[in-house]
Amino acid sequence: MKLVNIYIEECVKYLPRRLKEDVRLELKSELEEMIEVAMNEHDEEQAVKLTLESMGSPKHLADQYLNKQGYLIGPRYFDIYSKILKIVLLAMSIAFTVTYATKAFFTPQLEIWIIFEFLASLFNASIIAFAYVSAIFYIIERFEVKLDDKDLKDDTWTIKGLPSSVQDLPHHPVEHIFEIGFVFVAFFFINFQAHLIGVYFQSAQEWVITPILNELTRSSWIGLMNVWLLLLLLSGVIKAIVRLPRKVRLQGSIILDGLALVMFIIMVFTQSLINPNLAQSIAPGNEVFALMISRGFLAGGIIIIVTSASSWIVRIIRASKTKLDI
């Protein structure tokens, strides 16, 4: 009965933790009864094979247990949805706390309104984060929906599709979780506290912040930057959802990362992102320093583009040489 145990584990690994044990017991009992009936006409090995193949693909059987068509965020993805939402909210909370702690530190006279502004801003940003994550998972959920009950049965699946031993889903790579958190922190600063992304220096016994981003052209680049961040967020989420087929994760993330790279190139070379007064604010009249700042940001952008493009091309080459199993 080793194949039966492997089949059951292949099915329940796609289910949330709260359903695993009940489905495991129910499925085992059902399969044992079906095999016992089949053994009236076949030997045990053949009876097991015919029974399992009549049940169809374990992944599609898990879909039936999930009945995911009735959910906004179905049980299959709810665990990772909850985990990513918590990470995003935590990242936003940390970003807001650091921001307002910095603002309070550099404010000569601390006023009570900063606390209320902090709480109100954190609440608003949390609602936005919840909406973004929920919308992304809603899209993923709907793309995976089976449109007809007959689609839930994979007629091409055979017992040869089972692995030789029980295999669990891979763990969520830590780098993808950090990527999601980083994107939301960047989203917060860009949209709510862009003036705090700057160079800090003390002048006349008070702290002065010179923004790095060009506020005068903000209306032209803020939309592009938000699209860029959204593409990175979608890519990070897709990479982190190990319950998605490997083909979907790999191809989807490659496409999204490619679009994000194009968007970044457009921003670097067509938008006036950098504050033109940055060098003059730090070192007035120093033309050499101004030239270094200008060329330094351009060189940094080019390095990021070349590095990202190289990584993206390598992933495409690896994907082309790898068999993408659904």
Image (cartoon, rainbow, N blue to C red):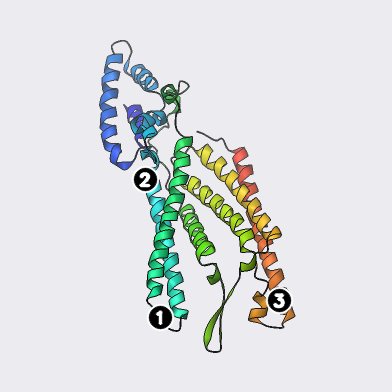
Judging by the rendered image, the residue that carries numbered circle 2 is 79
The residue closer to the viewer here, 99 or 82, is 99
- Image position, residue 267 (x, y; %): 66, 58
Q: What is the spatial separation of the Cα atoms under label 3 and label 1, in whole angstroms?
A: 35 Å
Residue 91 makes an appearance in the image: no
Between disc 1 and disc 2, the foreground one is 1
Q: Which mark is residue 290?
A: 3
Q: Which mark is residue 110?
A: 1
Q: Residues within 10 Å of mark 2 (few under 14, many from 20)?
A: some
The residue closer to the viewer here, 311 or 67, is 67
Report the amino acid beneath label 3: Ala
Query: Which residue is depicted at the point 74% across and 79% down?
Result: 287
Q: Which mark is residue 254?
A: none
Query: Which residue is depicted at the point 37% across and 18% down?
Result: 50
Report the amino acid beneath label 2: Asp
Quarter of the rendering occupied by the N terminus? top left
- Number of numbered callouts drawn: 3
Q: Residues within 10 Å of mark 1 (few under 14, many from 20)?
A: few
Mark 3 or mark 2: which comes first in sequence? 2
